[in-house]
């Protein structure tokens, strides 16, 4: 879908869903609400990952796809490790809700940035 309609058509709603899910997880009222929030965060991650891989592949020559996608996966791994570390420190110092609240802020900021960038049109 992102190939035909544009990456922002998938990414903006995905990050909005991720924002809502993160906020729900930060302040859940019941276990079911917590489950729904985590599912929303997973939906965001599942929608963003393949689009990111496609965008990474489009930025290089066809002969460099393997190298570029391997580099993308490496940075994804670094991101998973570092966000877990930062989230743990934030939770330990400021409370369990803070990493998820911060995730909500990041998701909505990215969604707004992508939406604004998509209105400007493709870069040359």
Image: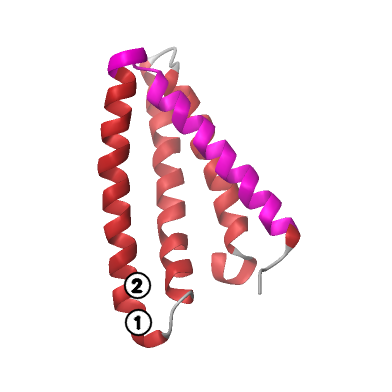
Q: Is residue 94 above or below residue 54?
A: above
- Residue furthest to the right in view is 120
Q: Position of residue 50 (x, y in %)?
A: 42, 61
Label 2 element class = helix
Q: Main secondary structure of the magenta part?
A: helix
Q: How many C-alpha atoms fall within 10 Å of the one at disc 1: few (<14), some, or many (≥20)?
A: few
At 34% from the left edge and 17% from the top edge, which residue is drawn? 96
Q: Which mark is residue 50?
A: none
Locate the C terminus and report the quarter of the image it occupies: bottom right
Query: Does residue 118 sit above or below 70 in this rendering?
Result: above
Q: Residue at x 32, y 47 (%)?
A: 79
User: Residues at badges 2 and 1 in contact (C-beta under 8 Å)?
Assistant: yes
The residue segment tinted magenta is 92-119
Is 96 one of the magenta-colored residues?
yes
* Residue lying at 43% horizontally and 68% vertically, measured from the top left: 56
Q: Quadrant of residue 4?
A: bottom right
Q: Position of residue 20 (x, y in %)?
A: 53, 31
Is residue 60 rendered to the left or right of residue 121?
Answer: left
Q: Inspect this view and state whether residue 112 appears.
A: yes
Q: Position of residue 69 (x, y in %)?
A: 33, 69
Dot 1: element: helix
Does 47 lie within the magenta span? Answer: no
Residue 43 position in % (x across, y down):
44, 44
**Structure colour scheme:** secondary structure
**Which residue is denoted by mark 1 in the rendering?**
64
Work out whether residue 95 can be spotted: no
Count residues near mark 2 (Cα–Cα under 10 Å), then give few for <14, some for 14-19, many for 20+: some
Q: Is residue 81 left or right of residue 36?
A: left
Q: Which residue is mark 2?
A: 68
């Amino acid at each position: 879908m992102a190939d035909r309609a544009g990456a922002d058509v998938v990414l903006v709603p995905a990050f909005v869903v991720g924002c809502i899910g993160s906020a729900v997880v930060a302040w859940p009222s019941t276990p079911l609400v917590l489950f729904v929030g985590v599912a929303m965060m997973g939906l965001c991650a599942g929608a963003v990952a393949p689009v990111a891989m496609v965008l990474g592949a489009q930025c290089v020559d066809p002969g460099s796809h393997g190298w570029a996608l391997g580099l993308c996966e490496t940075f994804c791994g670094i991101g998973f490790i570092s966000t877990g570390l930062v989230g743990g420190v934030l939770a330990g110092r400021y409370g369990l809700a803070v990493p998820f609240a911060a995730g909500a802020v990041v998701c909505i900021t990215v969604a707004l940035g992508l939406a604004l960038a998509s209105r400007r049109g493709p870069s040359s």
